[in-house]
Image (spheres, rainbow, N blue to C red):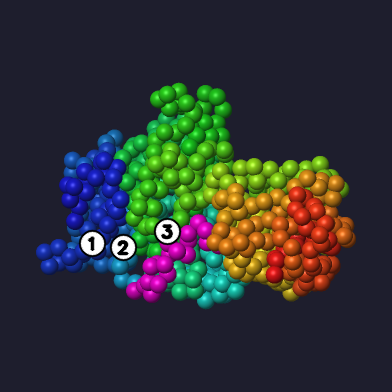
Amino acid sequence: MLTDFDAYLMGEGSHERTYEKMGAQLVEIDGKKGVYFSVWAPNARQVFLIGDFNDWNDESHPLASSDSGIWTLFVPELSEYAVYKYRIVSQSGENFEKADPYGFAMEQRPRTASVVADLNRYHWSDGDWISRREEFQALDRPLSIYEVHLGSWRKVPDEKWGSRYLTYRELADELIPYVVEMGYTHLELLPITEYPFDGSWGYQVLGFYAPTSRFGSPEDLMYFIDTCHQHKLGVILDWVPAHFPKDGAGLNFFDGTDLYSHTDSRQGEHQDWGTKIFNYGRNEVRSFLISNALFWIDKYHFDGLRVDAVASMLYLDYSREDGEWLPNKYGGRENLEAISFLRKMNEVVHGVYPGVLTMAEESTSWPMVSRPTYTGGLGFSLKWNMGWMHDTLGYMSKDPIHRKYHQNDMTFGLLYAFNENFILPLSHDEVVHGKGTLLTRMAGDDWQKFANLRAYYGFMWAHPGKKLLFMGGEFGQWQEWNFDTSLEWDSLKAPNHKGLQRLVQDLNGLYKNEPALYENDFEASGFEWIDASDTDNSVLSFIRKAKSSDAFLVIVSNFTPVPWHGYRIGVPQPGEYQEVFNSDSEKYWGSNVGNDGGLTTDQVPMHGYSQSLSLTLPPLATVILKRQ
């Protein structure tokens, strides 16, 4: 099973598939079926296997040590679903009961033992999707992501608990049809790697190789992803290599030493989150994490990894005061080991699985996050545009009477829009911790809040960059997201919420059908301002251009509650222009002000063009026009 060459590669930090050798492997040795256990604990004095198969006997199943620090044991006749832990005795004689770092399944919380699982039994039916994934997920293709916390998307009545989670298979029956009907191209799952504390939302991971048992078995998750692919829906995993919790059964102080993290808290601990930071300079840890990235793509067919908290990995002084951090060997604040790890991870993922996307949640101005490593970049496919999100939400929260003084909040993002491959994220972080919801953050009375949000979504879907919206945002929740309760589905009985939901559905449809909105997201040639300077009227107008044809769209957003009649904008070509989208349409619960479906250009020069359109701009609305 575990060869000297495997141990060498792990020690070198270059083993990319440690999950095929470590943990609990169902094997046959010398004609006997059983489970082969391997665990890395180089500083342990002794390691024992305990579980339901030996009545949790402390000493009946000792593991054999090796020079590589990997302890091994073959247990014949042991089968799938056996529950186990490692009892690790430190050099000082302390005892630690630990879950398997490579365990493929775990007990349901609050229990923390690992469970032997067979990940090779499921028969996949997504060959067509996998073979075409590189085509579906190319950077010049549409990418509209529905971000989901599986535990609170929808709950169902339960006799014992009052309400319960949907299982992976129930989610396949309910969530997937909904997301497909809404026109999204991808689902992004908040972390589903096993975690004991519901309130962490999955960001404090205990089982890095185990899908959470809250929603079912590993095979159930495979079925869910398989079903997504059969509906041409990609699935992205929110992946957390930035830190791990201090839970007793986890990686913390694993063999009586800080095996996976740094001993010095100035480098090894996140003060804000009460978690430990991985030691990215330790080769075995690098192999553990890089293999983990490949594991979810290999065994579960995930189509992308959204890497959480990248900024906290890049900077040694992240959220620290002077004297609370250790500089690198050159005296700087950059975490050189983490940078090296991220580059290597991206190289391996993209090299082994072309077409799989990696996405960085990176909130600073670190350069070249989404540029190839051979040009000095970090190698991510895409980067979340946190600056755009912050600026534009700040603008939309202001009373329209004041917006003319802040129009640069809506335009500033175009100064750097093509420096990275950006995703425009309106994520879960924007609807928690007292921030309110997207709807409540809009200015004005109830009608204006909905109108503002509709106009904002129209602006966002037309703006360069891929799209991400957290669940509930598509129909306008009033209450902040609560991980412990279901979304406010009853609100869809009201026409204002139903109208907003239909608007998002129509935007996704228009987005996927118009190459001008996605082909040139990351090229300046795909965008052109018509007028970014009409601050007095709080109006923005611009053009989006396709790459493979001369098709283009004209977008105009009016961020005041006043309709403008005879508002003239220049356009690049003469002819008839159809109004293909109007966020003020009555079908979206708008006031139905518009341009009667379309209008024709006049030979009136404007904005540097020889012809122009005289528009009726609805109040608090975005309109999109297409030349026929």
Magenta region: 123-148
Kind of residue at disc 3: Gly
Give whichever of discs 2 and 3 has the lower sequence position: 2
Q: Which residue lies furthest to the left in this view?
A: 30
Tag 3 and tag 1, C-beta contact below 8 Å: no
- Residue tagged 1: 35
Going 80% across and 52% down the picture, which residue do you hit? Answer: 606
Q: Nearer the viewer, residue 181 or 493?
A: 181
Kind of residue at disc 1: Val
Q: Please identify the quarter of the rendering in which residue 344 is found.
A: top left
Instruction: Measure how far apart labels 1 and 2 are at the Cα level.
Output: 8 Å
- Residue tagged 2: 116
Q: Please identify the quarter of the rendering in which residue 623 is found.
A: bottom right
Instruction: Measure how far apart labels 2 and 3 are at the Cα level.
Output: 31 Å
Report whether residue 368 is seen. yes
Tag 2 and tag 3, C-beta contact below 8 Å: no
**How far across and down, in percent of the image, does residue 448 sit?**
82, 59
Going 56% across and 43% down the picture, which residue do you hit? Answer: 419
Q: Nearer the viewer, residue 179 or 45?
A: 179
Report whether residue 480 is seen. no
Rendered-image quadrant of the C terminus: bottom right
